[in-house]
Structures are given as C-alpha cells and as structure tokens.
Image (cartoon, grey):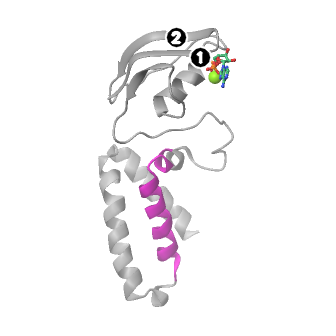
C-alpha cells in the first residue's frame, strides 16, 4: 500500500497542500486532477520519493513502478514493453534472453545454455502473475518480432 501521512508541502509562502493523509490501495486505479499549478506533479514526486515533503511521511510498497511525465520518452516502444520496463530486472532478463536466442544454434555454448535457464526462471515468475490474455499476446508478439 502507498500512503501519505500528514503530508504538507510548501514552496516559500505558497502552500500546495496541508496535512494530507490518504492511502492508495493495490489493484485500484486513481487519478489526480486539478488546475495548472495546483501541485499534481509535486504530489507525484513526493509519492515516488523524488522530493521530500515539507512535513509528514510517505510509506511505499517494496516494489513501485514509475512512468515519468514525458510523453515522448517511450514513443518507439509498444505499450506493453513500456509497462514491463517498469520491472527493470525482468526487462534486462528479457533483453539478455533475446540476444542469446538470436545466436545461431551451433554457436550457443554450455554457459549460454545455463544462463538461458536462469533467465527463463527470472522471466517466468512475473509473466505468470500477468492476466493470461496479456502474457499470451505479449509472448506471441515477441516471437513474431524475433522471427523477422
Ligand atoms: N522546485 C520548485 N520551486 C518552487 N516552486 C515550485 C517548484 N516546483 C513547483 N513549484 C510551484 O508549485 C506549484 C505546483 O506546481 P506543480 O506541482 O508543477 O503543479 P501541477 O502539476 O498541478 O500543474 C506551482 O505554483 C509551481 O510554480
Ligand atoms: Mg504537472
């Protein structure tokens, strides 16, 4: 669970929010709305730990994926790959696995084989937690990409 405990934020004389206590529950979706300058971006930065609030504290879950406010940063990637990049060990394992599988079969060494076993282990766990339709679509699309 992600929660704010008595969080106050001010920049000089400008008070953005005061004594905010609220919780964001796992599996729910939330939207932060407000006029320009209300403090939405500042609140997101406080939630992710990028900046410290003037007062109060934030508790974060052990794993927290963040997609930064930059609409061009992921233009070249598919949405699902962008989401997976939020889990950096998983994304790195997938990249490394693709490189090994792209090697001509006869060039794969024993060490490569062992490493592929480890990588499949890293990859399998989070993919099993995805909704089935999602992991299936993702896996088949990647195979198409690799075959090209
Ligand atoms: N680093 C900063 N120093 C001083 N004032 C800031 C800083 N960052 C944001 N502000 C001010 O805090 C207010 C809220 O900004 P921001 O969180 O970007 O609002 P929003 O995302 O809702 O448009 C604005 O008045 C902005 O000028
Ligand atoms: Mg903003």
Q: Position of residue 81 (x, y in %)?
A: 52, 50
- First in residue order: circle 2 vs circle 1: 2
Q: Position of residue 107 (x, y in %)?
A: 49, 89
Location of the C terminus by quadrant is: bottom right
Name which residue lies at 49% across and 60% down.
142
Q: Position of residue 6 (x, y in %)?
A: 39, 14
Q: Residues within 10 Å of mark 2 (few under 14, many from 20)?
A: some
Residue labelled 1 has its Cβ within 8 Å of some atom of ligand 1: yes
Determine the secondary structure under disc 2.
strand
22 vs 38, left or right, is left
| Observer-nearest of 22 and 35 | 22
Work out whether 79 lies above or below 21: below
Q: Which residue is mark 1?
A: 39
| Observer-nearest of 79 and 117 | 117
**Within the displayed image, which quadrant is ligand 2 positioned in?**
top right
119 vs 11, left or right, is left
Q: Which mark is residue 47?
A: none
In the rendered structure, which segment of residues is drawn in magenta?
Answer: 83-103
Residue with the most extreme bottom position:
106
| Observer-nearest of 44 and 6 | 6
Work out whether 44 lies above or below 128: above
Q: Which residue is mark 2?
A: 17
């Amino acid at each position: 669970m992600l929660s704010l405990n008595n969080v106050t934020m001010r920049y000089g004389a400008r008070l953005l929010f005061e004594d905010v206590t609220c919780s964001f529950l796992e599996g729910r979706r939330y939207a932060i709305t407000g006029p320009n300058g209300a403090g939405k971006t500042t609140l997101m930065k406080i939630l992710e730990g990028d900046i410290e609030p003037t007062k109060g504290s934030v508790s974060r879950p052990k794993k927290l994926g963040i997609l930064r406010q930059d609409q061009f940063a992921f233009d070249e990637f598919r949405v699902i790959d962008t989401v997976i990049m939020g889990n950096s060990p998983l994304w790195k394992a997938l990249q490394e696995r693709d490189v090994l599988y792209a090697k001509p079969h006869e060039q794969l060494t024993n060490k490569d084989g062992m490493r592929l076993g480890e990588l499949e282990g890293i990859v399998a766990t989070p993919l099993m937690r995805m909704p089935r339709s999602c992991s299936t679509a993702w896996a088949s699309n990647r195979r198409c990409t690799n075959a090209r």
